[in-house]
Image (cartoon, rainbow, N blue to C red):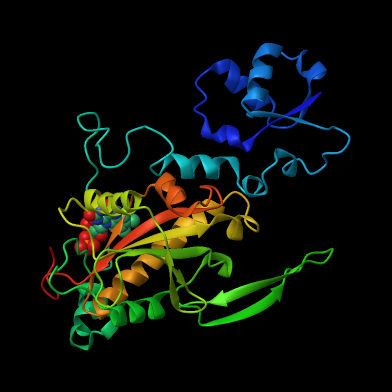
Amino acid sequence: MVLESSRAGALFKICNPKIATAIAILSTPQEIRRFRRQDGFPGVELLALLVDCQILLKIDAGKDRELRAAEGDDNLVLWDFHDLLFHARSTEGRHANPLGGVYPYLGVVPPLPAVRPRWPGKKIDLRKFSAAHKEAISPLAKLLHERHSTRSFDEQRPITIAELSRFLENTARVLSKWRSRVYLSDGGPVVGYAVRPYPSAGASYELELYLAVDKCEGLARGFYHYDAGGHALVPIGARTDEFEALLRGAELAMGVPAPPQILITITARFGRISWKYSSLAYALILKDVGVLTQTFYLMATDMGLGGCAIGSTNIDLFAKITGIEFHVEGPVGQFALGRGWKSGAAD
Ligand SMILES: Cc1cc2nc3c(=O)[nH]c(=O)nc-3n(C[C@H](O)[C@H](O)[C@H](O)COP(=O)(O)O)c2cc1C
């Protein structure tokens, strides 16, 4: 019999050293009779238990040349071990560990300063160069200086559907499409790409937008997917308790007593990017989220709207609402959007 450790094992906390040893040794397929002879062999009973739990998989040594495919889930195959572990552990929904601003090192290590202490050496002061250009500040520089986070929104003056349409069009809409062949020594497939207003690693554009609309003039309260290709909103039936839980999560994350007018959940179609990139797929996704987030901030500022990035997100709740498995497409970021109480005022 040949065994291989499953990527699904990434979602278990491996606290038993024997299990950890078995999984580490079996990260490449092993024949049991050879494995038995190794130091630290954990015993057949433990291996049988791991097989029952689908942490280890029996594979056919003769047939299963594509070892990842032998794991049985095409979407799981697209994940690197460390990426899936990171995703499940750095979001809410699939573990019960403390998460967020809980100050785990308070009283243990002092906080680092806000600004890095200067390197030794003779400095070149740039202030005199900047001062010369003060009066000619560009509209973009002005926007960057004005940008701030808005967490409370004007209940009497919700964002309108026309404003939402403009916001989405200028930040996330597909502008054009193109195709290109993947050039490999033995030939490669033709892959489709889209052009959008923000940059994306490898032009992957794996990010999707889902809107939980609490208040928007001209648009019914509810949950929607933004079809970036067709510039349209598609309603998705969400259970009331789950929809409310989504908005409540945003309130808690921002420390405010009311939900945002619109909560944008940024999801990733993980396979779109991990099909190409090994080892850094998930890191690229998070970088893309940062790029899109700043795009949202700047557009909201430009339109006299307010917004706030939200660092936490519940991957299990999104899976329940949409019925999409958490490792196929899931939340990687959130952004609260609406009209702030006073235009231009920070809160
Ligand atoms: C990745 C990221 C995650 C954030 N998460 C939260 C959050 O969960 N709750 C919140 O109130 N603000 C959040 N913020 C907003 C920051 O607190 C805010 O950007 C920072 O305090 C600087 O203030 P400013 O945006 O008004 O300049 C987040 C910002 C970023 C970029």
Tell whether 21 sits left or right of 3. Answer: left
Q: Which residue is at 82% across, 64% downward?
A: 185
Of residues 61 and 200, the one nearer the viewer is 61
Tell whether 209 sits left or right of 311. Answer: right
Residue 290 picture location, percent across and down: 39, 61
Q: Quadrant of the rendered structure where residue 37 is? A: top right
Residue 199 picture location, percent across and down: 48, 72
Residue 163 picture location, percent across and down: 29, 80
Against 65, residue 306 (above or below) is below
Of residues 134 and 295, the one nearer the viewer is 295
Residue 40 visible: no
Residue 299 picture location, percent across and down: 31, 76
Please identify the residue farthest to the bottom as the structure is shown: 136
Against 158, residue 242 (above or below) is above
Q: Which residue is at 43% across, 47% downward?
A: 315
Quadrant location of the C terminus in the rendered image: bottom left
Residue 195 visible: yes
